[in-house]
Image (cartoon, rainbow, N blue to C red):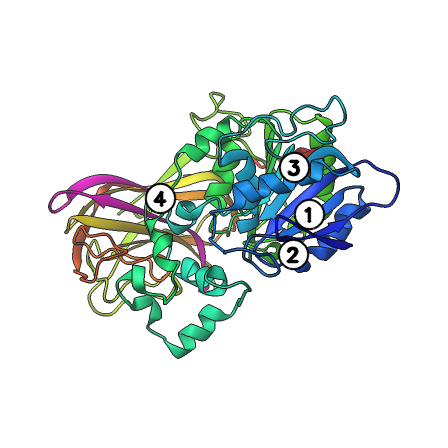
Amino acid sequence: MRSVRIGGLATDLCLPDGAGPHPAVLLRTPYDRRRHRAELRAWAARGFAAVGQDVRGRHASEGAWLPYRSEAADGAAALDWIRAQEWSDGRVVAVGASYAAHCALAPLLARGEAGNGAAGHADGGRGAVGRGPDAVIVAVPALGPGEVAREATGVERLSARAGWWLAHGDRADSDDQALARTLRDTPDLLDRLPVAQMLPLASWPGVWAARRDEGLWERAASARVPLLAVGGSRDPFAAETIRLWRSWGGPARLLLGPWGHGLTATPAPEARPEHHLDLGSLYAHWAREALAGTLAGRRGAIGLGGSAHWRAAASEVLGSGAPSPDPESEHAERLVPYRFGEGAGLRLVRGAEFVAEPGRPVRSDRLDIDEHGAPDRCLLVGPPLPRPLDLHGEAEVRLVATAEGRSADWVVRLVALRPDGRAEPLATGVARFEGQESLGERELTVPLGCLARRLDAGIRLRVEVAGHHFPAHARNPHTGEDPVTATRLLPSRRAVRMTGSALLLPVTRRTAAIDPVQEILR
């Protein structure tokens, strides 16, 4: 392991034993390259020249730290440097997780240069100036400033952004406990308004000035290099991981397990031993296949939480278009409706009419419900499941509902109630609807994202329909003002009509177990 500087950026280099030239792996991170030295050694042991770099302005790298601003240019410079080295055969795999996944993708997608990686390989690529990596491995990708700040539906993600910015935002190092410590000293921090001035950080207002990059998906569709997208069904960026895989123009593989943001290091309660994979070994094998040009098409594997099974990922199941035309297909999408207000579907417990009060919002960090006093949500519960239920695909809730105010967020939380009384979250969806005056009665669809679960017999489904999901998401003020700059919050009366409202779940017809490693490598 030796250290060099590339344009003032601190860089570690770990070369394999034996004569080169070698393919290379590039990992650029704001989380301290030294934490990845064991990972670099593991890549080198498998025959790759491994390069780890602190991004600009972080840890030992020079310059100003401006999140998401410099990664395309700095990443391209690192790729050019690698390809100019004698030990390089010109082929580079960019890898990274979370923000580092953005770093891996930025040289390829930020400027729309989504073609092949190196500019020719007639001489082995040595000295060639590449437009991007030759293959990309991204895990739990935090794709851009607008993408991490808001849901695809426009609703602001609050506590996760506050935590990240306090830990990493206006500083050269990291403090992973910054949010917890700040909340101990200032318990009402996340309640403070306006949101744009909540944190005393110079870069915090810029988080909310960013808008989602809708052109990202068109650039991804133009990509021709192989992609491996890895995510967790409990990760906040699961939808982005799936969409990246679904949109990618080149060979694409998806691996989605019952994990959190730390993947196998943070397994979900529904994970089983069969879901614990050796990701390092899988990444190296996939990189070899990708650089050899043996991969084609779009494939993937999804771990079915609550069982020992992995299932093949199908883009039609994950919301990319029409379902399979063959109703007996293993991947046939079968959205089964659980209708509101029906004993065989979802029985109304209380709150067909309720008040969404931003001063007393429904909490994202609690599953208990106070059934006394005025209802703050519409609450429905289904009967015990008579047999195990396998869910695989995109779920949603269709509402016929009324909201008071010029803007309203609709939050739907799906919870599993076990026979022993334990409550376990299954999915949460949030969508924003706006109008000139009172929103009146509308037909609304709230997406719940991808479900990959086996529910045991005896479990009951609970559905909560609310107006807030705080502090995971910022509170809608119901005035029509931007929730980021608003300082005035008003209550909003809501009504959910049972007729026409339903939970739609992607019930699978059969469970065909696969080997996830074989599925990713073929």
Q: Earlier in the sequence, mark 2 or mark 1?
A: 2
Q: Are marks 4 and 1 in contact (CB under 8 Å)?
A: no
Q: Earlier in the sequence, mark 1 or mark 3?
A: 3
> Looking at the image, which residue sits at the far left?
437
Mark pair 3, 2: CA separation: 19 Å
Q: Nearer the viewer, mark 4 or mark 1?
A: 4
Q: Which residue is mark 2?
A: 33
- Residue 425 in the image, given as x and y percentages of width and height: 44, 56
333 or 30, nearer to the observer:
30
Instruction: Residue type at mark 1: give it.
Output: Leu
Mark pair 1, 3: CA separation: 28 Å
Q: Earlier in the sequence, mark 3 or mark 2?
A: 2
Which contiguous range is marked in magenta? 422-447
* Residue 353: quadrant of the picture: bottom left
Residue 302 at least partly seen? no
Instruction: Residue type at mark 4: give it.
Output: Arg
What residue is rendered at 37% in x and 47% in y?
151
- Residue 16 in the image, given as x and y percentages of width and height: 82, 45
Q: Which residue is mark 3?
A: 80
Q: Which residue is mark 1?
A: 279
Q: Mark 4 packing: few (<14 Cα in 10 Å), some, or many (20+)?
A: some
Residue 292 part of the magenta-drawn span = no
Q: Nearer the viewer, mark 1 or mark 3?
A: 3
Instruction: Residue type at mark 3: give it.
Output: Asp
Question: Looking at the magenta stretch, what is its main secondary structure?
Answer: strand
88 or 470, nearer to the observer:
88
